Amino acid sequence: MKPVTLKDIARQLGISITTASKALKNYPDVSEKTKRKVRELAEELNYVPNAFAVGLRKQESKIIGVIIPTMVHYFFSTVLDAIMKEAEKRDYMVITMQSNETYELEKRQVDLLLNKGVDGILISLSNKTRDFKHLQKVIDYNIPLVLFDKISKLVNCSKVLIDDRKAAYEAVTYLIKKGRRRIAHFRGDLNPQNSIDRFLGYKKALEDHGIPYDPKLVYLCNNNSDFTDGYSSAKQLIDDHGEEVDAIFTVNDMLAIGAINYFNEKGIKIPDRIALFGFSNWFMASVITPSLSSVDQNALNIGKTATEILFEEISCRQKGEPITHKKVIIDTELVIRDSC
Amino acid sequence: MKPVTLKDIARQLGISITTASKALKNYPDVSEKTKRKVRELAEELNYVPNAFAVGLRKQESKIIGVIIPTMVHYFFSTVLDAIMKEAEKRDYMVITMQSNETYELEKRQVDLLLNKGVDGILISLSNKTRDFKHLQKVIDYNIPLVLFDKISKLVNCSKVLIDDRKAAYEAVTYLIKKGRRRIAHFRGDLNPQNSIDRFLGYKKALEDHGIPYDPKLVYLCNNNSDFTDGYSSAKQLIDDHGEEVDAIFTVNDMLAIGAINYFNEKGIKIPDRIALFGFSNWFMASVITPSLSSVDQNALNIGKTATEILFEEISCRQKGEPITHKKVIIDTELVIRDSC
DNA sequence: CTAAAAATCGAAAACGTTTTCGATAATTTT
DNA sequence: AAAATTATCGAAAACGTTTTCGATTTTTAG
């Protein structure tokens, strides 16, 4: 079974391919009668335009590309969900690629997407990306590009992100308002800007409320993909400081959950003896006992906004209008649960 | 900045487009000297073949399509991870679509993928899909199709799935071997075959070990996307049967975790007083306290195998060889943790 | 040195669509 | 009835690649 082409329709109706094409596109120089006949036959034969031919001719693919560090992650799969739904609304399809947190893959995937002729690209950068030539290439090719979540200030394009520093500040301030004074922080790796900003927000909240910042209360947790790191850091924290510490703000929910497991095991009461505040509002935060307070990143909104901006730029480009880049900060929200 | 074409290369070297193309494709009727010159210039100019033109000419897209009910789900995002990695190995890209568990979307998305000229399609069917004309269309178009996880016996194509009945049988048998006698079952909706099979496995395990099947111990949980259903069913179970019940086998981990939350709250000891066994081996199962025993579905293996079969069929089709459909059962594994 | 064989190249068609522009036919105006 | 206008159509080029096949040149064989 071969797909139906304009040629088939034209031949059956005894008209030219040109007229058939124009009839379907509702050109004014085709009679109503012919238009009707063409449309009816096209419907009957289930005609769909060949995407390669259209792409070749019009230089547009109706596809956008997305590159994320990893798929298997509540935040990213949620963002992707929003992206796909926005794309679908506009009859667009989405090619997704995983950089696996490596620069080489990310670079290669940008090339692949460009060569596929995608009409726009969304990227959340890998932690290891320090060089931006691959992104400059996208810009040089005049393909709309929007960075989200993991962005870089060095690239001249639209960006959608949250204010990590402010969000962390609010979370820690909440703990302080609840009477906590010795607040530890489990911070993340030094690379991604996010964890630095969250740390800075933590520090600023302490200072603004007259609580001295104590570096001995900050623990570096390198391995974010596992909750054992949170577990062992919690143990270390108790060993180091004993009864003194009354709260922990963690750079993500995984670490907090590791800590909760440790405290549950040792019979250390949450939140009475120690309170916890996570970050990301992972699905799991609502499921663990006690449930975990966390900062909601509004992943759906990030995905939706980034995609909307991308399509604005795509439409500008098609109309030949100049493109103005935007930087949008998505609001975060404190979700308060039993852990504090 | 315009992409480089064969024409550009040909002109700069004073040769024909034909020769340039053949040089890059290593045809035997091009001299080594010309080949070298073409290849060097192509490298220098960063030439990449236009995907539309290649697609139009060769009738292949180097893209496969994937339709899943939802992206935001540990199982599906893991399968997708495997699919994307297998595709990448073969220089293929993946277009993903979400049916959102509706037949209409699934049907529409199949059409969109076909019209995009994808070289193959992987689908995990929506719960609501009862009609398979859209899949028959794929087969009629001679596009390789592989169903995974949520499959249908009525479609003549390759399939990759687990043996739900056997897996449930093994899980319940494990509980019995551990001395449990009154084993309840939280079952899922009636629609997807999976939950029926898991129920049947549960029932058969009881019967094979001389434990009478008691329908009063089976609870229907409709809402799988939330753990409140597991919570309330656990409460109901205790209200109905009190001390009598000593284990629960749940159709998924979400329900088990809801139940754990209830038992933790009421001080009902797990596994002493009641044991639990989940299904899917969700990431969360290892994180909750007590950690949850579960059936691992081997999502990575499902994705990998399905994709491998798809590419085999794609390659057969290209060579004009006949395609033989396969049905592969992926092994599941009991992951024993603290809940039993 | 000629004939046959081999090596090297390029013209042209094809994939299916879109769009420009010129041609013809039908209609209206003078 | 002739001229001008309008309505309707189709030929052809273009998008960039691949592949067939014929043409030319070079090499080898006789």
Image (tube, coloured by chain):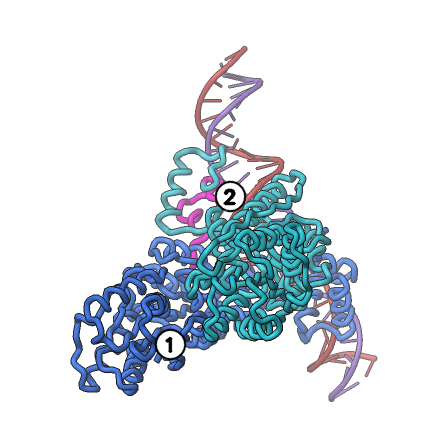
Chain colours: A cyan, B blue, C red, D purple
Mark 2, residue position: A18
- Quadrant in the picture for residue B154: bottom left
Tell me which amino acid carries mark 2. Answer: Thr
What's the residue at 54%, 73% (across, down)? A231
Q: Quadrant of the N terminus of chain A?
A: bottom left
Chain of residue at mark 2: A
Give coordinates of residue B312: x percent, y percent: 47, 76
**Of helix, strand and loop, which one carries label 2?**
helix
- Quadrant in the picture for residue B26: bottom right
What's the residue at 54%, 50% (across, down)? A332
Tell me which amino acid carries mark 1. Answer: Ser
* Alpha-carbon span between mark 2 and mark 1: 62 Å
Span colored in magenta = A1-23
Magenta residue check for B313: no
Q: Is A143 positioned to the left or the right of B213 in the image?
A: right
Q: Is A130 positioned to the left or the right of B175 in the image?
A: right
Q: Are marks 2 and 1 in contact (CB under 8 Å)?
A: no
**Numbered tag placed on residue A253 in the rendering:** none
Give coordinates of residue B30: x percent, y percent: 72, 72
For the residue pair B71 and A268, the one nearer the viewer reads as A268
Q: Marks 2 and 1: same chain?
A: no
For the residue pair B155 and A280, the one nearer the viewer reads as A280
**Numbered tag placed on residue B294 in the rendering:** 1
